[in-house]
Amino acid sequence: MISKLGICEKLTFIQKKCELFLPSFNLFFEKIFSFEFLIFFFIFLILIFLIIRNINSYHINFRDSTCVFHFFIFSATLYLFPLNLPYGDIWEEYQKINNNNAFDYLFSVNWSGHKFFNFKLFFYIVNEYLNLNLIYIHLISFLFYSSAIFIYLKFLNEIKLKYFFILLPLLFSGKWFNHIFETINLAWVLNFFLTLLIIYYLNLKKNFKLFQILSIFVLLLLNLGAGYIVLIYLIIHCILNDKINVKKKLVFLLCIVGILILTNLIIPPFKDESTNLISKYLIYFSSEKLFDIIITFFGLIPSIYLPNVLFKFDLFKILIILTGLFQSILLVVIYINSKIDIKKFILDNPFLILGIIGCLIISIMRINHFDQVRYVSYSIIFQIGFFIFIMKSKIIISFFDRFYKFIFTIFILLYLSNLITPHTGIFFSPYRFLDKTNIETCLLNNNLNKCEDLIYNKLFFYGTWFNKDNFKVLLNKMSEEKKFFFMIKNK
């Protein structure tokens, strides 16, 4: 009889990884069959009943059931596997809070040149008033993610209910677990939410909502460097949109430029040591680097579909690059055959255009990094736009209808693969919850000094990029302040 370890090794060919993954697999099922889960399930069931009791059951469809199911999975994960561990980049934030006053911390950039103001504000509040309980950050991420889904479903009806399965590996991808439960990725969840919101006000309101658009744009620029992606789209949209008169265009463009200058004066985006300094990327424009950028772009636009564990294999990386190339060629072919005016094409396909701009800029700034989970939000935006556009083609609709069961199966498999494979999906939090358990066990049985190496290795994934001496100072300070991380009995 083949053991679970043997099956894992046959699938991944990596024994060490399997030995690390299987305990989280066992923990997950232990929690699923626990009394704790049963209580949560019934509470959730009662809440859903109270919400839908006045809704005619006829109107509850596959889309609604899918949303409820996924909100249940995410909320159950928050409840069963609460993660208050400060992994990786969080230590830089904690170090800055301790070395600066509130104003200097909030209005500074991180090592990569990102402003992160929105994240810093939430993090500062959680540190100062909520005892650095990072579970609140994950809850905030979940709320912004849920809001983004509701906004999307409220105003976007181009993909018919029959083809809703297309969105399963996109809006409900297992990679969202990495975004929601990786504390620092709150910035990317916010970016996704604000980008959807700005598309809403730009494209689906009868009146041009200048104040709302500019307010969202300020938040985007203060959040991430990805705000510049929206900046490019706003300029293109403003210039091409004939519904906006010349006076409004001029005011809009001047406001955009003014906001850009103002946000850069308040929080200068780049320093000499920043890894994102634009001048450092001028060397990329050689024939070799341009080829790498193109390959990265084709790999990034469909990257949401490939489980992280498979990015380790060159065969799958080549396959995902070819998928991106095929989608790009298909777009060009359908565009040419449809004989759509380029202006109309750009204005009618905001998701597609923003996805292309976003993936292209990331490909330039992060060559050969299309396997990074934090960048898949632009892959999602591109893919949504891609399917909205191609599903307007009668040939594509005919193809989908003819091979409906086969295509449906493929998308379900893509969805499930990201939901149940290591490093993403439902096993992301159990894996880290084991780190929490190991650290707590060590602290219960030893003094802090004996646990420092274990904590450092676990929280920095056995890397050494964060200065260990600085880490020890911060760790002791955390312990003295009795942050939530240390709210267990210490010897």
Image (spheres, helix red, strand yellow):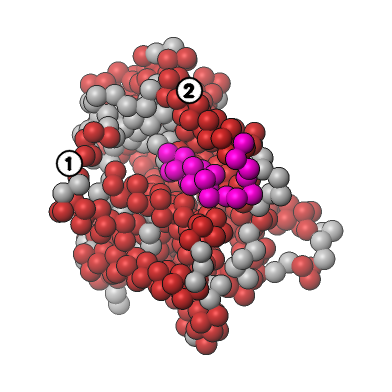
Residue at the top extreme of this rendering: 101
Residue 135 lies, in percent from the top left, at 51, 36
Q: Is residue 177 magenta?
A: no
Q: Residues within 10 Å of mark 1 (few under 14, many from 20)?
A: few
Q: Main secondary structure of the magenta part?
A: helix
Q: Residues within 10 Å of mark 2 (few under 14, many from 20)?
A: few
Displayed quadrant of residue 245: top right
Identity, as a three-letter code, of the amino acid under mark 1 = Ile
Query: Which quadrant of the figure contains the C terminus?
Result: top left
Magenta residue span: 228-247
340 above or below 362?
below
Q: Is residue 229 magenta?
A: yes
Instruction: Kindly state the secondary structure of the residue where label 2 is placed.
Output: helix
Say if mark 1 contacts mark 2, CB within 8 Å.
no
Q: Is residue 55 left or right of residue 94?
A: right
Instruction: Kindly state the secondary structure of the residue where label 1 is placed.
Output: helix
Q: Is residue 159 left or right of residue 221?
A: right
5 or 194: which is nearer to us?
Answer: 194
Q: Is residue 77 left or right of residue 369?
A: right
Residue at the right extreme of this rendering: 54
- Residue matched to label 1: 283
Q: Is residue 468 left or right of residue 207?
A: left
Residue 398 lies, in percent from the top left, at 54, 84
Q: Any mark on residue 262, and which?
A: 2
Residue at x 47%, y 40% (from the top left corner): 231
